Image (tube, rainbow, N blue to C red):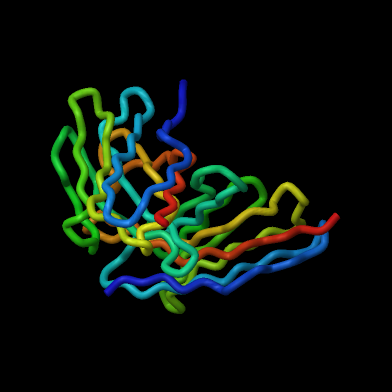
């Protein structure tokens, strides 16, 4: 079946460091891929998405590229800020329209 | 435009009781999806309603049910509560269906079963 695996956290970085959160998936066909972010006490917000192979999603300095050959959708940001501290979820959606989420990676950014 | 609202925000119930959670989608949104979030299992899809009909269902027992009203508001019911039902229940709305448009999430209802 469909599944998403992302690196376990927490991930702790200093401000302005480079961020990578790994995400790999298993799916039949060609799913759409997403990164969601959850700030403390809030619901999830869509951060970025990619709907086909080699697409790059980007938003707020975050980027992720849909890599079909490695079934990956790693999240990157060149210079993180304290305000980026949150939980990040990788997710996929296949033709059945159900969204499958990874378990989430908690990110702490130290000033 | 108001966001997705969920009531109540916090709830404490006892094993064996039942509970009803409410979700009001963004105005104009016709699809409402429900998710359960726990530290152990992460986010799991419960079901999706569109135009008062259940369109999709996750792998949860029949104790979990839902419905959608003509104004797109949705309720989720859990009967015969178990300790393992303690979780954050998130609702998300989208314009047409969860498949074709971005989902907007509410802040969630935190349910504690004792």
Q: Is residue A27 above or below residue B66?
A: below
In the image, A109: left or right of A53? right
Choose between B80 and B55: the one closer to the eye.
B80
Choose between B73 and B8: the one closer to the eye.
B8
Residue A53 x, y percent position in the rendering:
41, 65
| Residue ID at (31%, 33%) | B95
Residue A24 x, y percent position in the rendering:
47, 74
Q: Is residue A92 above or below residue B18?
A: below
| Residue ID at (20%, 48%) | B65
In the image, B24: left or right of A35? left
Residue B85 x, y percent position in the rendering:
35, 58
Can the viewer see residue A52 in this picture? no
Q: Quadrant of residue A79?
A: bottom right
Choose between A87 and A46: the one closer to the eye.
A87
In the image, B93: left or right of B68? right
Residue B96 x, y percent position in the rendering:
26, 36
Q: Quadrant of the C terminus of chain B?
A: bottom left
Q: Is residue B94 above or below residue A12?
A: above
């Amino acid at each position: 079946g469909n599944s998403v695996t992302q690196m376990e956290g927490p991930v702790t970085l200093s401000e302005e460091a480079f961020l990578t959160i790994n995400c790999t998936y298993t799916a039949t066909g060609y799913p759409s891929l997403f990164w969601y972010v959850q700030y403390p006490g809030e619901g999830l917000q869509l951060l970025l998405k990619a709907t086909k192979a080699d697409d790059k999603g980007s938003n707020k300095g975050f980027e992720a590229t849909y890599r079909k050959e490695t079934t990956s959708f790693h999240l990157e940001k060149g210079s993180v800020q304290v305000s980026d501290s949150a939980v990040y979820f990788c997710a996929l959606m296949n033709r059945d329209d159900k969204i499958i989420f990874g378990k989430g990676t908690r990110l702490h950014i130290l000033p | 435009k108001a966001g997705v609202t969920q009531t109540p925000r916090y709830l404490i119930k006892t094993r064996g009781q039942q509970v009803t959670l409410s979700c009001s989608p963004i105005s104009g949104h016709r699809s409402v999806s429900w998710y359960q979030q726990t530290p152990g299992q992460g986010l799991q899809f419960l079901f999706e309603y569109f135009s008062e009909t259940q369109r999709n269902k996750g792998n949860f027992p029949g104790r979990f049910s839902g419905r959608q009203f003509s104004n797109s508001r949705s309720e989720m019911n859990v009967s015969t509560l178990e300790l393992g039902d303690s979780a954050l229940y998130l609702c998300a709305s989208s314009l047409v269906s969860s498949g074709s448009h971005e989902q907007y999430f509410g802040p969630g209802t935190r349910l504690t079963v004792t």
